[in-house]
Image (cartoon, rainbow, N blue to C red):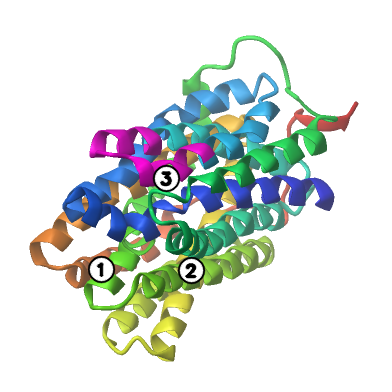
Amino acid sequence: MQMDRVLTVAAGHLVHDTFTAFLSPLLPLIVQKLSISLATAGALPLVFRLPSLLNPFIGLWADRIDLRMLVVIAPALSATAMSLIGVAPNLGTLALFVFLAGCSSAVLHVPAPVIITRVSGRRVGTGMSFWMVGGELARTVGPLLAVAVVTWRTLEGYYPIMVLGWATSVVLYFRLRDVKVQPRSKGTPAPLGDAWRVLRPLMLPLLAVLLLRSFMQAALVTFLPILMTSSGKTLWTGGLALATVEAAGAAGALAAGIVSDRFGRRRVLGAALLLAPASLLAFLSLDDGGALSYLLLGLTGFLLLSTTPVIMAMVQEVGREYPATANGVYMGISFLLTAGAAPVVGWVGDAVGLGTAFFWSAILAFVAAPLTLLLPASRRGGSPTGDIVLADD
């Protein structure tokens, strides 16, 4: 395992996703400023994820050409767009900024995990865990940073923070400029149908698992701050609750990938999807906002967000002939399902209350647990084979 390269890409992921994590904690202020409904607010993550429709096609080309520079520039682009959402004068402008950040996010999240896979040797689950820790830590830091800069500079005045994203892109350029991703072959990419035939035994049952998980994930990452503030708690409390979920999720992402390398992907995935909704239901039964509430939120985040690196390792193992395409197909489907679930959760929240929406999202996640038995078994400690290599000039 080439740890320096793993950590370099994971650090870029950390900064990039810190900025894209600004939307959820600032939604209470945005809803108030623009006078929009919860369903409309829930549609904003869908706008952010729409560019993920291109992920399979980005993956096709990433299997044939070096898309390393996309990893380099993504933090600067997303930081700029997400730092400007506070100055958006109307919903249309806000949606444009969110969409641009989504475009940048799409071009980062396809080639970067492939680099992680190739420098992880036989410890693919471990390498993917470090990648995911970067993202989950970002979603821990992001809400707290967003609330802090808005408290200091106001919603309309925090935009200078975008320079952190620019600086990160500069650092990534100098750290990765001597690294080349040499594709297996050059020219026109293989047909998407060829890649799908390889992935189909995994993706068909995985679609059902991802769909049922998506409502609970959307509820937590999009509406938890609103759930907290709607019960009379402060914006800081909402941001802290989301940060608790994401911080625990970072630990879960690291632990689950490592554990799944030893004990098997399906076993770890099924256990997490069984226990996570139980923890969320326990949290919903409390209304004191005390230490136990945060403990249950942390446990929920640890379990639910630990599922992603396990799934990504499975995708890379099954799709080892088309690693970037496989990742693109998975990321596109996963992002869109979670984003599409958000307006549904918001609509239910408008109709019967967010608490009820959270309850039913947990029930659906329970159903996903036994469906993991339909997923193909993966090799333990396996390493994807293929001809893509990383080399210094």
Residue 5 lies in quadrant: top right
Q: Nearer the viewer, residue 106 or 165?
A: 165
Q: Is 332 a magenta residue?
A: no
Q: CA distance from mark 3 to mark 1?
A: 19 Å
Q: Is 83 a magenta residue?
A: yes
For label 3, count other residues whose C-alpha is less than 10 Å away and answer few (under 14), some (14-19) or many (20+).
many
Q: Amino acid at mark 1?
A: Phe
Residue located beneath label 2 in the image: 243
Earlier in the chain: of badge 2 and badge 1, it is 2
Query: Where 293 sits versus 204, above or below?
Result: below
Residue located beneath label 3 in the image: 334
Q: Main secondary structure of the magenta part?
A: helix
On the image, the x and y values in percent for residue 390 come to 81, 33
Residue range in magenta is 80-98
Side (left or right) of 182 relative to 40: right
Residue located beneath label 1 in the image: 358
Mark 2 vs mark 3: in front: 2
